[in-house]
Amino acid sequence: MISEYADEILKGSTLAIARVITWLENEDERARPCMEEIYPHTGNAYIVGITGSPGTGKSTLTDGLTWQIRQRELTVGIIAIDPSSPFTGGALLGDRIRMTRHSEDTGVFMRSMATRGFLGGLAQFTQGATKVLDASGKNVILIETVGVGQDEVDIMRVADTTCVVLVPGLGDVIQSMKAGIMEIADIYVVNKSDLPGSDQLYSEIIYRVEQDAQMKNRKWVPPVIKTVAVEGKGEGDLLDAIMAHRKYLEESGEFLVKRRERTRQETLKMIHHELFRIIRQRLDKNSRIELMVGAIMEHKISPYKIVEKVVNEWLPLSNR
Ligand SMILES: Nc1nc2c(ncn2[C@@H]2O[C@H](COP(=O)(O)OP(=O)(O)OP(=O)(O)O)[C@@H](O)[C@H]2O)c(=O)[nH]1
Ligand SMILES: [Mg+2]
């Protein structure tokens, strides 16, 4: 039964892909044996992250980029981490994307995923979903995520190439470029280049990028690509830039270094997650955690002592 799903995924069945991604989403235990079986068939897809503030046109760009990739006869998997933002609202986004021109194309799998009410770690879910799409034979996987917080930085670590989308008129560009963007951006996209202020934004980013590259002695200087996603303009250039970055990574050897580091982080996170899940389950039993919290609140015991006690139950000092 379970390996049937693995088989179906390897054959590219949309139904099986959707089912197992739902398992991952719900932290359903049925996902694990399936993931184990498909794992040997992963590692072939190229993973592209697309991030930026709400409403910058990420979904429109993803759609155009998908079209460009399909023109080159490659298949596409899309994971959109839906911000459930007040701008669009959770359900709407999914509906909108399903209505795009790719909905009939079997070479494209699209999954929109709400952050609201999500059980597990988002980054961990994204990693899993990416592996499912990878094993199903999708050549390129696009991950759309909103914002530039720590969550997004974690999600973007899954990507081989990360595109940061900026638009004129948001006003917080300099601020957001300081806040971690420069660490993750391999390519900058100035979308909505039809709007006033886009030339200025473009020059500003180039200036900052070059300054940063010089200061940190970067070998890859992120290119800045102008697009008008609503008119389908510039997306071919964007795809060329992504391919150029891929070539750079592969030729410099950074590709393997990057993927190795990712594998290390993923493995550590999985161990962390699983240990925590087990301990959490036990602590929830008989409301033990509530008793502990009560005792801490009454200052009968310190949280430090509790941590020591709990850890000692599972990993006695003599074993460490
Ligand atoms: N003028 C202009 N509008 C654009 C362009 N690209 C997208 N838009 C519009 O910007 C709005 C937001 O586009 P989306 O693609 O939904 O943006 P998003 O970044 O995915 O939004 P969230 O997922 O809600 O963060 C829509 O109304 C688009 O039509 C562009 O190049 N120029
Ligand atoms: Mg979107």
Image (cartoon, rainbow, N blue to C red):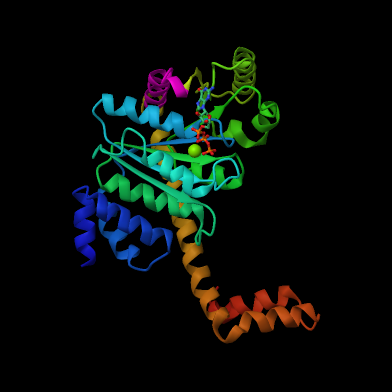
Residue 123 inside the magenta-drawn segment: no
Q: Residue at x 44, y 54 (%)?
A: 125
Overall secondary structure of the magenta stretch?
helix
Q: Quadrant of the C terminus?
A: bottom right
Q: Residue at x 43, y 45 (%)?
A: 94
User: Where is residue 109 drawn, in percent x and y?
Assistant: 31, 43
Please state the extent of the stretch shown in magenta in the rendering: 229-246
Left or right: where does residue 291 sit relative to residue 277? right
Left or right: where does residue 149 sit relative to residue 103? right
Q: Residue at x 50, y 53 (%)?
A: 122
User: Where is residue 192 drawn, in percent x and y?
Assistant: 54, 21
Where residue 218 sits, quadrant-wise, is top right
Residue 237 inside the magenta-drawn segment: yes
Q: Quadrant of the N terminus?
A: bottom left
| Identity of the residue furthest to the right in this view | 299
Please indicate, yes or no, whether residue 230 appears anywhere in the rendered image: yes
Left or right: where does residue 240 sit relative to residue 145? left
